[in-house]
C-alpha cells in the first residue's frame, strides 16, 4: 500500500481573481474560486478569462486553482454545467469542486473532482463510496471530531486527499442539509443563494407563551478557528486545510492566509517528512492576527468533542477586541482607558441593549494612560455612550495600513453501496440515475424540487 501523502495544502478562498493572486502571494498553496455560474456563492462569480489568468499566475508557484461547480443542478442546466467543466479544463484549472452527482453521468474532461462540503461527508462509508466513484479529494463535514476524521482517513485509499475546514464561518446545520433559507424566502443554499437566516435575531417562547430569549441570534454560531489543532489534524490524516470565505474581502484573505502560512511553516520546520504543496517562500510585511479581521467570536467547534459554548447569540456582526471603558465625556469627545494604542481612523463600537453601535475615531490624543477620542459622529447621536461603557475596536487603522503593503513571494525554478442513503441533494434525473446505478436504495429528491 502506498504511503500517506506528505504534502500539506493551505487552501484559501477568493471572491475575485485579484484576491486569488493576493492569497497566493500571502502563502496559499491552492485557491478555490467561483466560475461564471453554478457556484455555491452566487455573487462570487468570475469569467473563464479571469480564471485562466489566475491559473497562469498560480502555476508559476506550483500553486493550484480549484473552481466551485457545487450547486445542485436542474435537468435543464446539466449541459451548461458540462460545458463549463470543459471551459475550466481548457483554462488549466486543476480541479472542480462538485456537489451534484449528475455531473458524473456526463462527458466530463479528465480533471480532478473534489467532493464539496455540500456532500455532507460525515461517515467512513460515504467517504469510501465517493472515493470509489472517482473523487480525488473529499471535503469533510465541519462537525467531525479529530478522531472521526482519522476514521474517515483510514477508510479511503491513501491517494485520496482528506480536506478539512480550519477557519471561517460555520453553518448551524450540516452543509448541504439546510433548507431554512429556501423555506423562508425561496432562496436555496444548495443553489448558491443562502439568505443567511441563521444570522437573524429571533424571539423564543416556551409552550406556555413565556419568552425564553428576546431578539437573540439563536441560530448564529461562532466562527471556526483550528489554529491550536493543526498538528492533531495532520496526525489524523488531513492534508488539505481550507479557509472559508469566498465573500470575504482582500484584507481578510491576506490576514488569515498569512496567519496559517506562518503556523504551517513552523510545523514544516519541525516535521521534515512533510512539505508544502506549492513552491517558494512568502515574506509578510505585517503581523497576521485573526482577531483583527471579521469574526463572530471563535471556537474550535467539535474537534475535541462536543461543547456548549459555540453560539454567537448577542450579535452576528464583527465586534472586535475589547479596548477599555469610557471614563469621561465632553461635548465633542470622550475619554477612555485603553489596553492598546489607538490611531486616527480606528473603527470603534459599543453595545447598547442588544444593538452594536459603531463610530469612527477622527482624531485621538493620548494623555498618560487615557486616550481622548474625537469621533466623526456628533456626540449627541451616540446614544447610550456614557461613563463605564465598554469600547471595542473592529478596525485597527494602523494595522490595516501595514496590511496594504505588498508581500513578496519567491517562485521556484463500479461500486455497489446498497446500505447508503442519499437524501436531500437529488435535483435532477442524472443524479438519481447515478445513485441507482451504484445500488443506492434510498434516494430522496431535493427540498428545492417541491
Image (spheres, grey):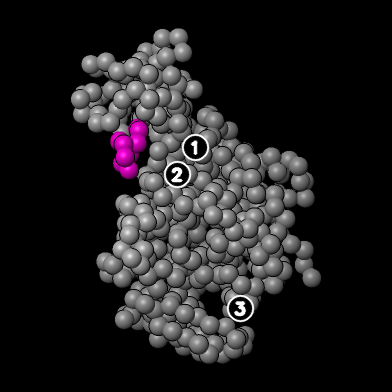
Residue at (57% x, 64% y) in the render: 140
Disc 2/disc 3 C-alpha distance (Å): 35 Å
SS category of the residue bearing label 1: helix
Task: State whether the magenta stretch is mostly helix, strand or loop.
Answer: strand
SS category of the residue bearing label 3: helix
Q: On screen, 395 above or below 338? A: below
Q: Do the CB atoms of the residues marked 1 and 2 lie less than 8 Å apart?
A: yes
Residue at (63% x, 41% y) in the render: 263
Residue 89 x %, y %: 48, 65
76 relative to 393 in the view: left or right = left
Mark 2 or mark 3: which is in front?
2
Q: How crowded is the residue under tag 3: few (<14 C-alpha within 10 Å), some, or many (20+)?
A: some
Q: How crowded is the residue under tag 2: few (<14 C-alpha within 10 Å), some, or many (20+)?
A: many
Name the residue beneath numbered marker 1. Answer: 291
Which residues are drawn in magenta?
349-357
Residue 146 x %, y %: 66, 59
Name the residue beneath numbered marker 3. Answer: 129
Q: On screen, 386 above or below 86? A: above
Residue lying at the far top of the rendered structure: 368
Amino acid at each position: 500500500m502506498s504511503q500517506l501523502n506528505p504534502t500539506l495544502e493551505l487552501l484559501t478562498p477568493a471572491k475575485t481573481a485579484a484576491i486569488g493572486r493576493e492569497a497566493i502571494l500571502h502563502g496559499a498553496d491552492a485557491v478555490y474560486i467561483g466560475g461564471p455560474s453554478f457556484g455555491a456563492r452566487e455573487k462570487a462569480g468570475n469569467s473563464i478569462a479571469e480564471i485562466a489568468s489566475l491559473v497562469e499566475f498560480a502555476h508559476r508557484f506550483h500553486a493550484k486553482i480549484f473552481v466551485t461547480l457545487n450547486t445542485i443542478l436542474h435537468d435543464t442546466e446539466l449541459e451548461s454545467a458540462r460545458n463549463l467543466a470543459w471551459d475550466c479544463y481548457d483554462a488549466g484549472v486543476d480541479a472542480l469542486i462538485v456537489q451534484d452527482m449528475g455531473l458524473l453521468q456526463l462527458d466530463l474532461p479528465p480533471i480532478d473532482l473534489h467532493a464539496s462540503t455540500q456532500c455532507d461527508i460525515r461517515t467512513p462509508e460515504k467517504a469510501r463510496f465517493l472515493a470509489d466513484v472517482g473523487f480525488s479529494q473529499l471535503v469533510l463535514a465541519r462537525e467531525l471530531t479529530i478522531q472521526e476524521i482519522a476514521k474517515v482517513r483510514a477508510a479511503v485509499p491513501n491517494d485520496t486527499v482528506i480536506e478539512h475546514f480550519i477557519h471561517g464561518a460555520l453553518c448551524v446545520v450540516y452543509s448541504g442539509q439546510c433548507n431554512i433559507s429556501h423555506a423562508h424566502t425561496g432562496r436555496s443554499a444548495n443553489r448558491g443563494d443562502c439568505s443567511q437566516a441563521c444570522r437573524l435575531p429571533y424571539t423564543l417562547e416556551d409552550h406556555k407563551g413565556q419568552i425564553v430569549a428576546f431578539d437573540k441570534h439563536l441560530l448564529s454560531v461562532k466562527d471556526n478557528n483550528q489554529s491550536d489543532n493543526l498538528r492533531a489534524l495532520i496526525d489524523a490524516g488531513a492534508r488539505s486545510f481550507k479557509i472559508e470565505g469566498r465573500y470575504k474581502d482582500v484584507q481578510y484573505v491576506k490576514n488569515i492566509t498569512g496567519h496559517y502560512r506562518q503556523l504551517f511553516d513552523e510545523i514544516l520546520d519541525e516535521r521534515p517528512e512533510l512539505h508544502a504543496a506549492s513552491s517558494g517562500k512568502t515574506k509578510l510585511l505585517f503581523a497576521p492576527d485573526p482577531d483583527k479581521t471579521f469574526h463572530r467570536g471563535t471556537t474550535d467547534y467539535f474537534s475535541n468533542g462536543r461543547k456548549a459554548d459555540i453560539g454567537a447569540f448577542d450579535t452576528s456582526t464583527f465586534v472586535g477586541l475589547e479596548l477599555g471603558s469610557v471614563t469621561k465625556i465632553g461635548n465633542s469627545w470622550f475619554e477612555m482607558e485603553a489596553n492598546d494604542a489607538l490611531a486616527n481612523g480606528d473603527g470603534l463600537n459599543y453595545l447598547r441593549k442588544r444593538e452594536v453601535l459603531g463610530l469612527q475615531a477622527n482624531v485621538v490624543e493620548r494623555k498618560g494612560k487615557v486616550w481622548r477620542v474625537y469621533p466623526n459622529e456628533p456626540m449627541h447621536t451616540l446614544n447610550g455612550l456614557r461613563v463605564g461603557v465598554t469600547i471595542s475596536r473592529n478596525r485597527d487603522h494602523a494595522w490595516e495600513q501595514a496590511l496594504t503593503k505588498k508581500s513578496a513571494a519567491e517562485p521556484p525554478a463500479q461500486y455497489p453501496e446498497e446500505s447508503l442513503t442519499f437524501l436531500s441533494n437529488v435535483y435532477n434525473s442524472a443524479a438519481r440515475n447515478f445513485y441507482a446505478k451504484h445500488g443506492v436504495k434510498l434516494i430522496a429528491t431535493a427540498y428545492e424540487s417541491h
